[in-house]
Amino acid sequence: MARSARLDISYIAKLARLKLTPEEEADFSRQLADVLRHVEKLEELDLKGVSPTFQTTGATDAVRPDRVDLERGLAQKEALAGTAYSRRGFFRVPKIL
């Protein structure tokens, strides 16, 4: 990353839909420059022979198989028994406009 590249904080703020004061722009500009300098230091590291790490805890996905279980489902009357508002066999909900 070229150190000479100037960061246009006002443009970045516009993209993020943020209204910043000039003082905030100056603060964020310094902070972002600090972060980018740190990234530049990380780019100097020799990582040859280091394999990428994407998972460090050994945890695996704990999900059930995606299948239809018709025996465990509720009948229409059972499902509607839990609501005070139903109409013609469906849940009745307020309109959202």
Image (cartoon, rainbow, N blue to C red):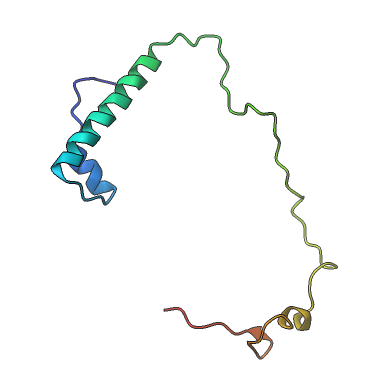
Tell me which corner region of the image, top left, top right, bottom left or bottom right, holds residue 7.
top left
x and y percentages locating residue 77 in the rendered image: 77, 84
x and y percentages locating residue 66 in the rendered image: 74, 53
Task: Name the residue nearer the viewer: 23 or 35.
Answer: 23
The residue depicted at 22 percent of the width and 48 percent of the height is: 14
Q: Could you tell me how many numbered marks the image carries?
A: 0
Task: Name the residue nearer the viewer: 5 or 25.
Answer: 25
Task: Name the residue nearer the viewer: 44 or 65.
Answer: 44
x and y percentages locating residue 87 in the rendered image: 64, 90
The residue depicted at 71 percent of the width and 80 percent of the height is: 82
Residue furthest to the left: 22
Residue furthest to the right: 71
Whether residue 24 sits left or right of residue 57 in the image: it is: left
The residue depicted at 73 percent of the width and 47 percent of the height is: 63
Which quadrant is the C terminus positioned in?
A: bottom left
Whether residue 80 sits left or right of residue 4 in the image: it is: right
* 66 over 50 or under it: above or below: below
Whether residue 49 sits left or right of residue 10 in the image: it is: right
The residue depicted at 56 percent of the width and 9 percent of the height is: 49
